[in-house]
């Protein structure tokens, strides 16, 4: 008898990310500008037929990355984008019907994976004023919870946890033997990190990506940080040669050229300042100081603005429904000033 996994049959997925190249892409928190062209050309000079022909070698890059993170390779699992690492942690550290606690709204793949593998995803919503109450998270950490997912900072809300809040969460998680996954996709836009916990404690993982500040979303590269035995378990899920040779080559080049990284940060900061100053000057409420994205409360219908931005202005942004007292609002990726100017001009024209 033919078999189809009913969970997959009923799973709702959105695959609308193609044909975006002719748009200003402010919808998926990529860097709309990207790495400098001469830097790309320089890296490509080293690509030989041999390099393309052979399976990717991970050891060298893992060592470069470990040095960059001041750790060793036993603490790292390279993955094809952090979305893959998140999936492996869920697969390895939760069971069928297992309880996973996470905040909403948040990165949607946590819920997608939970559904895909028949896990019970328990949602902790934000307060109406868009703050997150750590007590509300702790209240959901029951004895049968298997995984707590936190984001530092959260996408799309841009909230972060203080050291005390994080320690309180971790203490309860430890008491109840709950694995903790901290998604740090937006690290570097917000420097505070909980990676030390993933390096020094058991049952704490951090996932990171090269898609955001490193501006390499097209390459697909991320990593999971954790204690060596946990990392070995995560690694077992990886498909053979899961990380791309080109991705590792580019990532190594960025790591070895700190001035490139700094220039990405500087351009981003200039874009963010321009955007927030301009929104303030035009009477817009906004939220999100920590990632490379911002929530904007519109004056008219947010969903219509998303549609008109796409059809009339060739700008892609996202809307989110029921976001506290912001209602339905926009989430916009932040990039260099020129792109923020383009977005603001379009917003002020359409939002009236
Ligand atoms: C919070 C968060 N985590 C993880 C990811 C996945 O990133 P990637 O798979 O490109 O590493 C994203 C992508 O937008 C994200 O917003």
Image: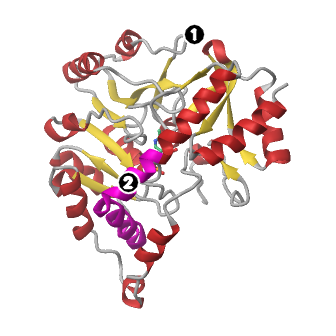
Question: Mark 2 or 1 closer to N-term?
Answer: 1
Q: Is residue 222 left or right of residue 299?
A: left
> Which quadrant, please, contains the N terminus?
bottom right
Looking at the magenta stretch, what is its main secondary structure? helix
Q: Is residue 156 above or below residue 81?
A: above
Range of the magenta residues? 240-266
Does 42 appear above or below 273? below
Question: Does residue 74 belong to the magenta stretch?
Answer: no
- Compared with 1, 264 (above or below) is above
Q: Residue 261, which numbered label?
A: 2
Residue drawn 61% across the image and 14% down it: 324
Badge 1, how many Cα within 10 Å: few under 14, some, many 20+?
few
Q: Mark 2 Cα within 10 Å, few/some/many (few <14, many 20+)?
A: some
Residue that appears at 33% across and 36% down: 191
Name the mark on residue 128.
1
Left or right for 144, reference 102: left
Where does residue 58 sit, x and y in percent of width and height?
A: 28, 69
**Residue 109 visible from this viewpoint:** no
Q: CA distance from mark 2 to mark 1?
A: 37 Å
Please tell me in which quadrant of the rendered image residue 137 appears. top left
Relative image position of residue 135 (x, y in whole percent): 37, 9
In the displayed structure, does residue 174 sit left or right of residue 133? left
Between tags 2 and 1, which lies in front?
Answer: 2
Q: Quadrant of residue 284?
A: top right
Question: Is residue 245 shown in magenta?
Answer: yes
Q: Position of residue 236 (x, y in %)?
A: 28, 57
Residue 137 visible in the displayed image? yes
């Amino acid at each position: 008898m033919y078999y189809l996994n009913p969970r997959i049959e009923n799973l709702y997925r959105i695959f609308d990310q193609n044909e975006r190249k002719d748009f200003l892409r402010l919808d998926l928190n990529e860097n709309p500008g990207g790495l400098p062209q001469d830097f790309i050309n320089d890296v490509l000079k080293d690509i030989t037929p041999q390099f393309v022909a052979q399976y990717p070698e991970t050891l060298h890059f893992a060592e470069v990355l470990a040095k960059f993170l001041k750790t060793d390779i036993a603490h790292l699992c390279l993955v094809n984008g952090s979305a893959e690492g998140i999936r492996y942690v869920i697969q390895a550290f939760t069971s069928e019907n297992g309880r996973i606690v996470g905040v909403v709204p948040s990165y949607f793949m946590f819920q997608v994976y939970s559904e895909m593998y028949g896990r019970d995803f328990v949602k902790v919503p934000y307060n109406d004023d868009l703050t997150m109450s750590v007590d509300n998270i702790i209240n959901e950490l029951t004895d049968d919870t298997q995984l707590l997912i936190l984001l530092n900072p959260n996408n799309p809300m841009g909230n972060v946890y203080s050291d005390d809040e994080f320690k309180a969460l971790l203490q309860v998680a430890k008491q109840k033997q709950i694995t903790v996954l901290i998604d740090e996709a937006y690290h570097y836009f917000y420097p505070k990190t909980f990676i030390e916990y993933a390096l020094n404690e058991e049952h704490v993982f951090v996932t990171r990506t090269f898609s955001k500040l490193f501006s390499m979303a097209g390459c697909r590269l991320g990593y999971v940080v954790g204690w060596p035995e946990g990392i070995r378990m995560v690694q077992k899920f990886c498909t053979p040669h899961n990380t791309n040779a080109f991705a590792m080559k580019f990532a190594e080049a960025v790591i070895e050229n700190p001035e490139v990284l700094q220039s990405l940060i500087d351009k981003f900061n200039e874009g963010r300042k321009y955007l927030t100053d301009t929104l303030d000057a035009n009477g817009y409420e906004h939220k999100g100081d920590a990632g490379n994205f911002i929530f904007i409360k519109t004056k008219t219908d947010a969903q219509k603005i998303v549609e008109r931005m796409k059809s009339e202005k060739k700008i892609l942004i996202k809307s989110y429904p029921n976001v506290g007292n912001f209602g339905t609002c926009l989430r916009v990726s932040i990039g260099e000033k020129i792109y923020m100017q383009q977005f603001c001009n379009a917003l002020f024209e359409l939002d009236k």
